[in-house]
């Protein structure tokens, strides 16, 4: 595993046992990045531990919600409206036009309950909205894309 800072490594080592205890199917992809992957329903969350300067780390959790949807004004309006309604996290559209849901925590102050809330909100939100987005604007859910 490659870490850019000691704080990033410490954060990764702090949350690793929590994730494995909280979620059944947690795995780390076979590359040297501090990443965990967690599937739930039709969604898959990626939990990344990233450096934030030299003295802090962040825990970025995100999920592809839909890939290949028709990006229209109505879809963007829908996503922005949902962003204003949701308690945690935001929808975004990446450079490839894929719809993601993501949220971030400060690593040094994160506790087990915050991590569980963060990861669960990403998984549940992606799983909740993927079918509605595909039905209206097309594309594929994360689960369908993996098959």
Image (cartoon, rainbow, N blue to C red):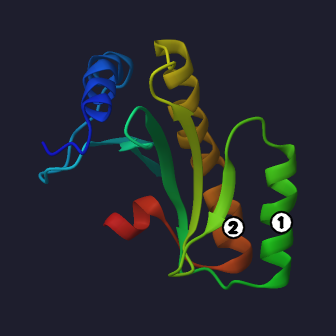
The answer to whether the residues at label 1 and label 2 have Cβ atoms under 8 Å apart is: yes
Residue 139 on image: x %, y %: 56, 78
Left/right of residue 76 with respect to residue 70 in the rendered view? right
Kind of element beneath mark 2: helix
Find residue 78 and name its label: 1
Instruction: State how far apart marks 1 and 2 are (Cα).
Output: 9 Å
Residue 81's place in the image compared with 57, above or below, is below
Residue plotted at (39% across, 69% down): 145
Q: Nearer the viewer, residue 86 or 144?
A: 86
* Residue 30 visible to the viewer: yes
Residue 15 on image: x %, y %: 34, 23
Most extreme residue toward the front, as rendered? 54
Viewer-side label of 1, 2 = 1
Q: Nearer the viewer, residue 34 or 127?
A: 34
Q: Nearer the viewer, residue 39 or 90?
A: 90
Residue 71 on image: x %, y %: 70, 83
Kind of element beneath mark 1: helix
Left/right of residue 2 with respect to residue 130 in the rendered view? left
Residue 72's place in the image compared with 37, above or below, is below
Circle count: 2
Residue 6's place in the image compared with 110, above or below, is below
Residue plotted at (57% across, 80% down): 97
> Which residue is label 2 attached to?
133
Quarter holding the C terminus? bottom left
Residue 1 on image: x %, y %: 12, 42
Residue plotted at (50% across, 81% down): 96
């Amino acid at each position: 595993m490659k870490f850019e800072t000691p704080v990033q490594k410490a954060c990764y080592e702090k949350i690793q046992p929590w994730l494995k205890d909280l979620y059944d199917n947690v795995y780390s992809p076979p590359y040297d990045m501090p990443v965990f992957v967690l599937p739930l329903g039709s969604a898959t969350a990626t939990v990344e531990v990233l450096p934030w300067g030299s003295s802090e780390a962040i825990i970025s959790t995100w999920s592809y919600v839909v890939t290949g949807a028709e990006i229209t004004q109505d879809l963007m309006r829908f996503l922005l409206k949902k962003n204003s309604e949701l308690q945690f996290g935001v929808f975004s559209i990446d450079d490839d036009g894929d719809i993601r849901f993501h949220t971030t925590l400060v690593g040094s102050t994160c506790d087990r309950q915050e991590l569980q809330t963060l990861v669960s909100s990403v998984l549940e939100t992606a799983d909740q909205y993927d079918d509605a987005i595909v039905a209206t604007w097309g594309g594929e859910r994360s689960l369908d894309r993996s098959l």
